[in-house]
Amino acid sequence: MIGILVTSKIEWEALLKVYEIDSNLTDKYIYGDYYKTNIYNKDVLLFRSIGRKAMSSAAVQYMIDKFNLRKVIFIGTATLVADYLDYGDIIIPDKVSEYDLSIREIEPLIKESNIIELNKVNVSMKYFEGLLGTSDKSLVTKKDYLMAKETDMVASDTEAAAIARVCKLNNIDIVIIKGISDRISEEGDYSAQTEEYEETAPGIIDNITRNYLNEVL
């Protein structure tokens, strides 16, 4: 079985909408919701977990054990870092790394030992590769953004590297597909950035599920 994961209620609702699934028919588990179905003649587990690294990685391990998943596809959103990206652009990273583990005063933000290489995917639709950085702290301050800009990161999220590590430890395939949903506010207005995310996230999920999933399942 293949697991398709999202990590926010907004993204979960958008995912269910694409496949015309009544949320009342989904099942609950300790970390969120899930629904077993068939997509493109493949058995698929759609599931949502609580966000951030600890809960999302625990949710993935739980589902690997419960349903014997052989592959996880993590879809969702990310915050812009690279200047050449724009809202709605799709990233299928070839590398992920946590960037909140270093002692910033004396170590690089992203250490080589924390980078996880991901398998190359063949997708005909337009997408960007690169390094997706993961931190428990959302990328919302200019200070953190400027530090991220000094690295090879193209975008930032709060779960991907942790999920990838769990999948690698279990020796199962992991594909990550993210869309750019927001960027830091120059005025430091976090509420504006949140509103951007809420407006763009459903469309990103719709785009990924309709145009990319069939090529990576």
Image (cartoon, rainbow, N blue to C red):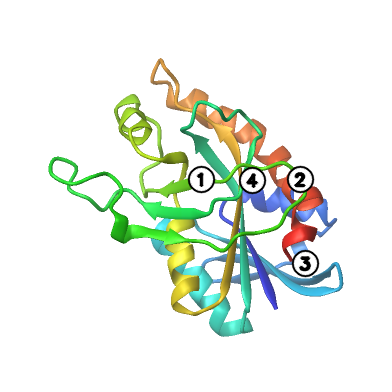
Above or below: residue 99 compared with residue 79: below
Residue 200 pos. (x, y %): 66, 33
- Secondary structure beneath dot 3 equals helix
Q: Amino acid at mark 2?
A: Met
Viewer can see residue 94? yes
Residue 140 pos. (x, y %): 40, 31
Q: CA distance from mark 1 to mark 3?
A: 37 Å
Q: CA distance from mark 3 to mark 4?
A: 17 Å
In the drawing, what numbered circle is on residue 10? Answer: 4
Can you say which quadrant of the picture contains the N terminus?
Answer: bottom right
Viewer-nearest of labels 3 and 2? 2
Q: Earlier in the sequence, mark 1 or mark 3?
A: 3
Viewer-nearest of labels 1 and 3? 1
Image mark count: 4
- Place residue 139 in its image quadrant: top left
For mark 2, what is the residue?
A: 125
Q: Residue at x 33, y 59 (%)?
A: 114
Q: Residue at x 40, y 15 (%)?
A: 187
Tell me whether the residue at label 3 lies in contact with that at label 2, contact meaning CB atoms closer than 8 angstroms: no
For mark 3, what is the residue?
A: 25
